[in-house]
Image (cartoon, grey):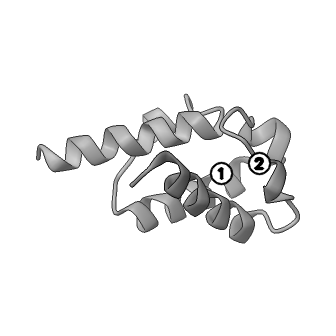
Amino acid sequence: MSDQEMMDELLKIIHVCLPETETENITPETVINRDLGADSMSFIMLMTKIEGRFHIRVPEDTWSNLATVQDVMDAIRKAEKEAAHA
């Protein structure tokens, strides 16, 4: 999956979890809690939907280090690689 395809999928998930967010302004540098207004519960919902969509498992201790959309994309890539080597 290309970065653009992954970004498109993330935008769909963000729209579902945070419907008031204008997804056309989201970039990889977008800060999830500050720019998207995600609180802890909506972040958990985002991560759960991301894990389901990409068929991955991101360790919960990694979640606290995910600030930007790019951080999430990097975590998805890492989880995909780890799953492929398991």
**Residue lying at the far left of the rendered structure:** 86
Mark pair 1, 2: CA separation: 6 Å
For the residue marked with disc 1, what is the amino acid? Phe
Tag 1's secondary structure? helix
Residue nearer the viewer, 4 or 15: 4
Residue at 81% from the left image edge and 68% from the top image edge: 19
Q: Is residue 49 above or below residue 66?
A: below
Q: Residue at x 78, y 63 (%)?
A: 18
* Circle 1 Cα neighbour tier, 10 Å, few/some/many (<14 / 14–19 / ≥20): some
Identified at 17% across, 49% down, the residue is 84
Task: Examine the rendered structure and indicate whether residue 15 appears above or below residue 68.
Answer: below
The x, y position of residue 40, in whole percent, is 70, 48
Determine which of the numbered discs, if any, sits on residue 8 in the image.
none
- Taking the image as shown, residue 50 lies to the left or right of residue 37, namely left
Q: Which mark is residue 43?
A: 1
22 relative to 57 in the view: left or right: right
Rendering coords of residue 43 (x, y %)? 65, 51
Q: Quadrant of the N terminus?
A: bottom left
Mark 2 closeness class: few <14, some 14–19, many ≥20 residues within 10 Å? few
Q: Are marks 1 and 2 in contact (CB under 8 Å)?
A: yes
Q: Position of residue 48 (x, y in %)?
A: 51, 61
**Residue placed most toward the observer, 37 or 7:** 7
Q: Amino acid at mark 2?
A: Asp
Dot 2 lies on which element? loop
Residue projecting furthest to the top: 65
Q: Which residue is mark 2?
A: 39
Q: Is residue 66 left or right of residue 76?
A: right
